[in-house]
Image (spheres, rainbow, N blue to C red):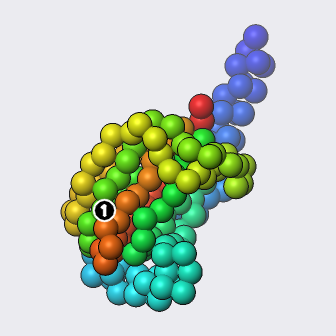
């Protein structure tokens, strides 16, 4: 039994040490103004595309950060494995959450898109607002003609 305990303790020690060194730890910081300046090129991409553009800022083992801009309403979305946390940096939009995704199609593993969200709750978003959308919840951003929205996103992996 003593050998088992020694081996077990050695394994725990090795797993904790290798886990610490297996990932390079760092922190990231972006000011509000830096993000808005960085979003200028997203504005240009959105104007030449479907009205929205985003970029991944950093990737981590179980989450990643993004910067997003839109100048048109989007379709419905549902992320099966990722929760969304939004910080609204600039602009105004209506967010629909819950309900069901209309005309849902899988666009990537765990990612569904649809034409809209039916039966969800509406919330008005403005600069400074924080939003959490759990994995598996349908959602859609609606913008009025001429409005824009710039937002910082943290996508966190959730196992369901």
Q: Taking 95 as reference, is 8 above or below it? A: above
Does any portion of residue 59 appear in the rendered image? yes
Percent from the top left, x then y, of residue 30?
35, 74
Helix, strand or loop at label 1? It is strand
Quadrant of the frame with the C terminus: top right
Above-or-below relation of 19 to 39: above
Q: Residue at x 45, y 57 (%)?
A: 154
Quadrant of the rendered image containing residue 36: bottom left
Q: Quadrant of residue 50?
A: bottom right
Viewer-closest of 15 and 25: 25
Report x, y in % for residue 109. Answer: 72, 49
Please tell me whether residue 111 is drawn above or below residue 56 in the rendered image.
Answer: above
| Residue depicted at x 33% and y 40% | 121
Near-viewer residue (50 or 4): 50
> Residue at 27% across / 81% down in the picture?
33
Q: Badge 1 is on which residue?
A: 93
**Horizontal relation, residue 125 to residue 63: left or right:** left
* In the foreground, 153 or 19: 153
């Amino acid at each position: 039994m003593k050998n088992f305990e020694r081996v077990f303790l050695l394994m725990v020690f090795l797993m904790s040490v290798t886990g610490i060194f297996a990932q390079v730890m760092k922190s990231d910081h972006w000011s509000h103004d830096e993000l808005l300046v960085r979003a200028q090129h997203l504005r240009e991409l959105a104007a030449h595309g479907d009205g929205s553009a985003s970029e991944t800022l950093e990737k981590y083992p179980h989450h990643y950060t993004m910067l997003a801009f839109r100048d048109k309403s989007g379709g419905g979305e549902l992320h099966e494995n990722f929760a969304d946390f939004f910080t609204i940096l600039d602009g105004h939009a209506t967010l629909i959450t819950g309900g069901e995704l209309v005309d849902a199609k899988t666009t990537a593993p765990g990612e569904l898109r649809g034409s809209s969200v039916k039966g969800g709750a509406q919330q008005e978003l403005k600069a400074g607002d924080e939003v959490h959308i759990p994995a598996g919840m349908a959602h859609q951003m609606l913008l009025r003609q001429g409005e824009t929205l710039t937002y910082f996103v943290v996508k966190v992996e959730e196992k369901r």
